[in-house]
Amino acid sequence: MLELKDVTKIYNPGSVTEMCLFEKFNLSIEKGEFLSIVGSNGSGKTSLLNIICGSIPIEGGEVRIGKRSIDKMKEFKRYRKIGRVYQNPAMGTCPNLTLLENMSLAENKGRPFGLGRAINKSRSNYYREQLSVLGLGLENKLYDKVGSLSGGQRQAAALIMSTLTPIDFLILDEHTAALDPKTAELIMQLTDELIKAKKLTAMMVTHNLRYAVEYGNRIIMMDNGNIVFEKAGAEKEALCVEDVLKIFTDISIECGN
Amino acid sequence: MKKHIFTILILIITLAVIAGCGSKQIPVIGISQFGEHPSLDNCREGFLQGLAEAGLKEDKDFSTDYQNAGFDPAIASQIAQNFSSANVTLMCAIATPSATACFAAAEDKDIPVVFTAITDPVRAKLDSGNITGTSDKLAVDEQLELIRKLQPDAKTIGILYTTSEPNSVSAIEEYNEKAANYGFTIEAIGVVQQSEVTLAVDTLISKKVDCLSNLTDNNVVGVLASVLEKTNEAKIPVYGSEVEQMKIGCVAGAGIDYIKLGKQTGAIAAKILKGEAKASEIPYEVISEYSIYINSAALAKMGISVPLEVSQKAIEATNS
Amino acid sequence: MGVFLDLVVSTVTQGLIYALLSYGVFITYKILDFPDLTVDGSFPLGAAVTAVLLTKGFNPYLTLAVALLVGALTGLITGLIHVKLGVRDLLAGIITMTALFSINLQIAGSNLIIERTVNTIFSAEPAMALFGNLSLIYRKLIVSLFLTILFKIILDLYFKTKSGLLLRAVGDNNTLVTSLAKDKGKVKIIGLVISNALVALSGCIVCHEQRAFSSTMGTGQVVFGLATVIIGTTLFKKLNFVKGTTAVMIGSILYKVSIQIAISLGLPANLLKFITAALFLAILVLGKLQKGGVKKNA
């Protein structure tokens, strides 16, 4: 489904601060997989997501969706098939627009933004229905500016918005990291339910090892641009947090952290 | 919140009412001056003297409302509208932008406009309608003749001007036309804004012009002092076109006395106020008298000796 | 009282004409979060083109459309310089503005004046047939009011379309626009095009009103626009039912009124800019105090 083949990523090429992160990096993700990615800071997790989305260029190799290379495809065009939720709840919504306007924007993804009316009042009920699943009372805040909502509410709204239209991939970039533990738990559960209900292929970067172990059907650990640990299917089911934590600490000691 | 808005609105209305109720029974002359620099100030002073000489006394026969726009065309137009709304008896506009603004604002009410310090009223399209005034047309012939007498060997005259000033453009045309009669060629450099003037001076100096001759270009006159600094260093004499320029340090010039020009303007305004003639019936007047001004100190520095025939007629321009 | 009324009418007219420029700055500065300095060039461009067309005997109403068009073009150029060539927003505007200074003079030749015999939008046929019995200053008021309200309505309607909503989203959070699979650069260009079209239109009407084009008439217009946008949006921050366009329109009128008061009070022109700055600061502080007040209440 998604394949990274011999990807090379060099930061600041040609300068004294040149840093090679990936050298001939390979990773492939099958349709319907829910992949959790863990690793210490600077291990290349977020760079990996950015490479897939086209936010940063690569120096070698290629990224393919299906059989097609998307290297030449501009960032915004890749998002036709990708939904992304960021660590910062502010990134996924427009704070000065109302929730209704945000939902309308999200629902129109993939279609032209022409001179038709942006807000279709008759869709309000559908939005309410989608939002009520969250159990955060957002269904009653359609006319509130999103900026006035709490971080958790905004992140929940961002999650709903990114999956409102049919997409192939859902990319979760430490999307629970900025939330309090209780809200984070709730958002994580919602994410899992959404992925299952909509049968999405998902990649989740997280620092929360428990989430990485509990959710999804495949886990990889990254270090210095390499995959150092990988488990999938039944093997992953058998994994417990302590196992992962031990490997994680071992790597960190090796690196002198 | 609403309270704030209302406070502001009430404040505005009160102020405007106070401002609006100041009108008196005697005729009011609205004087709109484009900005403050010595030549334009002299125009205004002369204008008031001209009215006095015609027997009209300020605060008895007329009152004035003087405004200057600080060289901002948008302010000039608000000033003009202010005059028009206040139904002044007559508008006196000093310099072209103020004159066009006044003329536009007076369109409906047909308030007479008397202008001064406009070099080319025809080009500025201020030559027909309920408008008249005085033109400070440059004394190009007299100037060229003077330069020839003071610098018998000179060949090239450099001139700086602003391309967007109609006054300057027509003056350059005249210089080009007449220079050959006196054996000169003209090296004119146009600028679009004041900051480019000093750069243009460098260019003129590098082209080895024998002297510079000044117009009444507002941008150039505004930075004349720094122009003179450069030319003095290069030992190139600069001729002025108006007494104030000689006071700053130009060597000599056949120029207009703006006080005189103002007086002439005041006399026209007096005719209109007295009802002797309408502005539309009076053709604009071009100043007919020019004087030769010299700055002996500046001439000596350049090593130019003044022939007797010049020094006899010349008036020494010094800062007194 | 008639004197006072005339003064108010002509000052409000000025405010209305310049409100079109304020709409433009509102779009770039407030909605797109793009400090666009093109305005100092596109404003006189509207006037230059208008002055030339009027002296050549074109229908005065046609100049409105032409000004919109050439203004749009300047916005497009700034947008392309910024988006396609990757030049920073502020610099892209400066480049276009600087080039326009020469272009404006090239178009107009030099400062131009339109003779009284030439009809303007305030004195040509449809306006005369409708309001010919009114004096010129009232005709100016009505025509300006009509145009300013017309474009306010068009803009308000536009902001409610999908394209308009996307425009608002770009200034608010451009990452989201990318996530929506839309080219944020293209959306910015659309905003700049609309903005500068309105700015040039404002310049066009000023030219009709002043019967003149001057090469320096654009200087300081960005600052004016920013001031009116900030005055308007700060004063009406707490009133959600007041639309942004209405707020900046009132901001523009207030600005011109305060200048007029300063002139009426006989304050020297050299001080006018200082007064503007003081007014600016006062409004900003006023806005801050309000915010503080709300916090206390919450």
Image (cartoon, coloured by chain):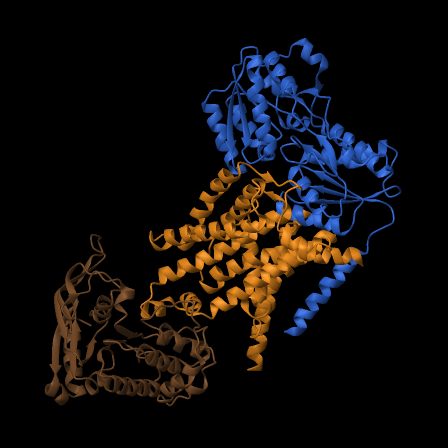
Res B177 → quadrant: top right
The answer to whether residue B46 is left or right of residue C41 is: right
| Number of marks | 0
In percent of the image, x 56 and y 40: which residue is there? C56
Among the chains pictured, the one given blue colouring is B
Q: Residue C121 placed where, x, y %?
A: 62, 51
In percent of the image, x 65 and y 44: which residue is there? B70
Q: Which quarter of the rendering shows the N terminus of chain B?
A: bottom right
The answer to whether residue A212 is left or right of residue C200 is: left
Res B97 → quadrant: top right
Among the chains pictured, the one given orange colouring is C
Q: Residue B279 placed where, x, y %?
A: 78, 36
In percent of the image, x 61 and y 31: which residue is there? B167
Q: Is residue C279 visible?
A: no
Res C172 → quadrant: bottom left
Q: Is residue B306 visible?
A: yes
Q: Is residue C7 above or below residue A127?
A: above
Q: Is residue C25 above or below residue A87?
A: above
The answer to whether residue B82 is left or right of residue C186 is: right
Colour used to depict chain A in the structure image: brown
Q: Residue C68 placed where, x, y %?
A: 50, 53
Q: Residue B263 placed where, x, y %?
A: 78, 31
Q: Which quarter of the rendering shows the C terminus of chain B?
A: top right
Closer to the camera, B254 or C73?
A: C73
Q: Is residue A105 above or below residue B71?
A: below
